[in-house]
Image (spheres, grey):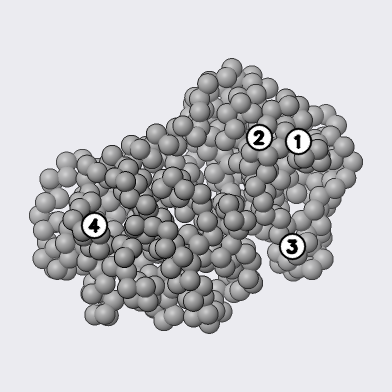
Amino acid sequence: MTATLMIQGAGSNVGKSMLVAGLCRALTQRGLAVRPFKPQNMSNNAAVTADGGEIGRAQALQALACGVEPLVDMNPVLLKPETETGAQVIVQGKRLTTVRARDYATLKPQLMSAVLDSFNRLKAQADVVIVEGAGSPAEVNLRAGDIANMGFARAADTPVVLVGDIDRGGVIAQLVGTKAVLEPGDAAMIRGFLINKFRGDTSLFDDGYALIQQRTGWRGLGVVPWFSEAHRLPAEDALDLAGSRGDGPVHIACPVLSRIANFDDLDPLAQEPGVRLTMVRPGAPLPGDADLVILPGTKSTRGDQAMLRAQGWDIDLLAHHRRGGRILGLCGGYQMLGTRISDPDGIEGPPGDTPGLGLLEIETVMRPNKHLTRVAARHAASGLQVTGYEIHIGQSDGPDRARPFATIDGRPEGAISVDGRVTGTYLHGLFGADAFRAAFLEALGLPPSGQSYDAGVEATLDDLAAHMEAHVDLPGLLKIAGAGG
């Protein structure tokens, strides 16, 4: 029988995704066939799978840690927030509907069968399935119809290890308090706990560790020190976006839009030794010394266009262009650069038209069908091949399409302004191609570094696996999962 184990958190952002990735790589290195699984995820940072759907970026990274292609079954329910109160619901890789948050509770019971169906298919491929929860089981007000935490654990008869984050303080209360609020049947699913993000001498927490074991009756499975290389792995949560990374001579700025999506596009740039990447938070202007401004993807193009104007970033962007600066729009950012964005069917919100920034001579019309595919393209200027993916609604056309950014099977893709300083493309993931990234940065005056982004991610996953081996009771975890000691 396939062994299964669920990693749940005593709160949000306790490091579940990273721990699961590390466990996936460590157990894979031990010769086991491992698969990651997350019943329900909420993220606008999605990945396109080999079977033509979309899942959360964290599950794609965890699949990489297992040495396998990401599949829609690894994240059967993905919620992509479009507004403060509503989200698009993706089921087994495809859009099902858009619902308001208050109405999602009535939909959840219908989704459990799809979740279990995907889980059982993964089990058939694996020796061990490592499941990641969402949020916290302590949110007992959300327990009815739950598919993300204890509702799934009990339906799938999967034992749970609970993770507490000591870096934010109060970790004893996090774990002991979680047991106190859970009903007995749910609490009985938890077989052990982990302490994550410890800084300093772990022996200083020995008394606290023993107290948690005494108060909960759960087995302690380790104290995991802070993993300093975590920033080298693709982040899924927009809350993880740092203000500024690097101190190189080439300055790239990116505004953090309210519905920013697929922002891991920027990770390869942030890790280049000659780049300083500034993620500009609301309330701050776009830096005047930027060599390049990137308008990122967004789950709500017209909504974030309004947000961009409200922040005054449209004025900053036009001033940047007048000073001779370069601008790159990715997906939704590409659509914003045009003259108009039309949504006649109200796909992203109320039907209507929104004026664009007017920096590219293109217009975009939102269409019901989402374009979702992996692609191999050829960069028009350099002739270099790039691989990536498209994940968007909307079609863009206009005179600047006569100067494409790239070609896909001979067809033009993207657009470039007459002056050559404003570029838009629907391609995500293009900076992961080392040769293209080097050529792109060389055009900004930065000599090639010779750095391999993919090799860096793989090395970091190996380091994370070693971190797990050193600080986590892996035999204990496997025994809880049903795979022996």
Marks 1 and 2, Cα distance to the nearest angstrom? 9 Å
Marks 1 and 4, Cα distance to the nearest angstrom? 48 Å
Where is residue 317 drawn, in percent x and y?
71, 39
Q: Marks 3 and 4: which is nearer the front?
A: 4
For the point 71% across and 45% down, the residue is 426
For the point 33% across and 50% down, the residue is 32
Q: Earlier in the sequence, mark 1 or mark 3?
A: 3
Q: Quadrant of residue 345?
A: bottom right
Placement of the C terminus among the 4 image quadrants: bottom left
Residue 477's label in the rendered image is: 4
Q: Compared with residue 90, is residue 376 higher up or lower down, i.e. above or below?
A: above
Left or right: where 124 falls relative to 351 = left
Give the residue number, with chain letter if any, for mark 1: 406
Q: Compared with residue 404, is residue 154 higher up or lower down, i.e. above or below?
A: below
Q: Secondary structure at mark 1?
A: strand
Give the residue number, with chain letter if any, for mark 2: 386
Residue 415 appears in the rendering? no
Q: Amino acid at mark 2?
A: Val
Give the residue number, with chain letter if any, for mark 3: 369
Q: Amino acid at mark 3?
A: Asn
Label pair 1/4, CB-CB below 8 angstroms: no
Marks 2 and 4, Cα distance to the nearest angstrom? 40 Å
Q: Earlier in the sequence, mark 3 or mark 4?
A: 3
Q: How many residues crowd around disc 1 within 10 Å: few (fewer than 14), some, or many (20 or more)?
A: many
Label pair 1/2, CB-CB below 8 angstroms: yes
For the point 63% across and 71% down, the residue is 96
Q: Amino acid at mark 4?
A: Leu
